[in-house]
Image (spheres, grey):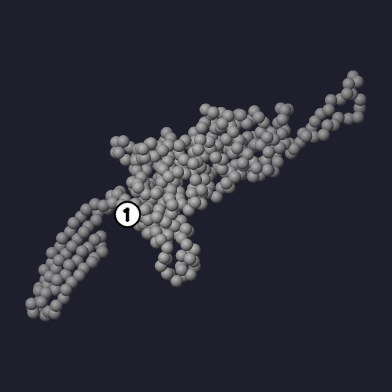
Amino acid sequence: MGAPHSKGPESPKNGYPRKLVFVSSENEAYYNREEVTKLQVLIEEATRARLDSPESRFITPEGGVIDRLGSRFHHVLYGRRGSGKSSLLRHMEKARRSDGDLVAWADQEVFMSLDYPDVLVSTLQEVLRQFSEQCRELAPEDDRSWLVRRLGRRPDSEHQHVAAELMKASHGLGRLKALPSESEVVWSSSVASEETSDGGTKVGAGIEREGSRLSWSRFSSSAARRSTEADLSHKFKATKAGHLERAIPDYRELMVRATSVVPNAFVILDDFYRLTDEDQPRIAGYFHRVFKDTAVWIKIGSINYWTRLYSGSMSIGLQAPHDIRELSLDRGLLDFQASKVFLEQILSALSSEVGVDPDRLLSEGARDRLVLAAGGVPRDYVGLLGEAIEVARNRGPSSKSGSEEGV
């Protein structure tokens, strides 16, 4: 606040003492401080969940959601956009990896424009690739040394063997993705014989598939030859979807081998609602069949009303609560006070990083209005706060009490 002063030394009119006027400078307003600017930057950076986010920013939701999410069962985590699904899944990923488990993260928004089955091929390829890399990281130190790699010695640990098999399968899916969804495969075979003048024969056979040829023959000496040849061929159509179905036992065996060297494995399918209604049950069902009776668990992040995990007409997918359990972060405003406490914990965590005092930044009335405007959604809450700070700076201090202090 500015110091009180009068307009001049002359005597006040009517003999009454002159009223003291407090002059405020906009630069003295709390929301103009440098640390509040840093808070605005932090708010923008913190609205997206990342694996390397500081642990201090994570606020545990009520109801034991985090403990259930990390358990050995399939789960779908529902919540509106900005409700904290990805942050919670990232926290679980970090905790599980620190325990020595495998965790693959597949953001379905990345593959949302692909047609089926390419979206499934791409997701499965990403899962196998991440599992392979993590298996190598968990291998004994002697098996990861530069000398082993330089000499090209075959690794002895099971971690490295499993990692190699997982990466081989991932590369195979990469080649499959480059092929058309349906192709014609031609198997052709030929049998030829040659009769020589001295009674000897030369017999040969060849098998050709998609342009490559494999043949064998037996020879004898001859001066003159008469040859005969017969060709046989067979054509059939092959599809990527058919290949994926036939490969399920092989992928299951890979998952069994992977979980023989680690305690558990988790596959996180975030932003699942980005996929089409037709693709969602097919992808969820495929992973369920691959992971059945293994120690690999599916964790899905999605929006409730945009998600279809099971198709009764096709009998495919994951059916709740038998195959998968549902968790929710949609607390909303049904319990206003609980939502307010949770959101202000998030604000306090962010403010402490840059040295901002939330009590000086926000009036009590502003706190309530901010929760209401955000509808209890964390991302909307911090986003609206950043915008409110900017509005207060543009407005500046006014005649309203406290306008020079808080937002």
Vertical placement of 42 versus 212: above or below? above
Q: Position of residue 338 (x, y in %)?
A: 56, 31
Vertical placement of 204 versus 22: above or below? below
Residue drawn 84% across and 25% down? 19
Q: Quadrant of residue 383?
A: top right
Vertical placement of 256 versus 405: above or below? below
User: Looking at the figure, which quarter contains the C terminus?
Assistant: top right
Q: In which quarter of the image is residue 41?
A: top right
**In front here: 194 or 346?**
346
Left or right relative to 307: residue 3: right
Q: Position of residue 379 (x, y in %)?
A: 55, 38
Left or right relative to 393: residue 153: left
Find disc 1 in the rendering and name its residue: 250
Q: Is residue 307 visible?
A: yes
Q: Where is residue 181 in the image (x, y as percent from the top left)?
A: 31, 50
Q: How many labels does the image show?
A: 1
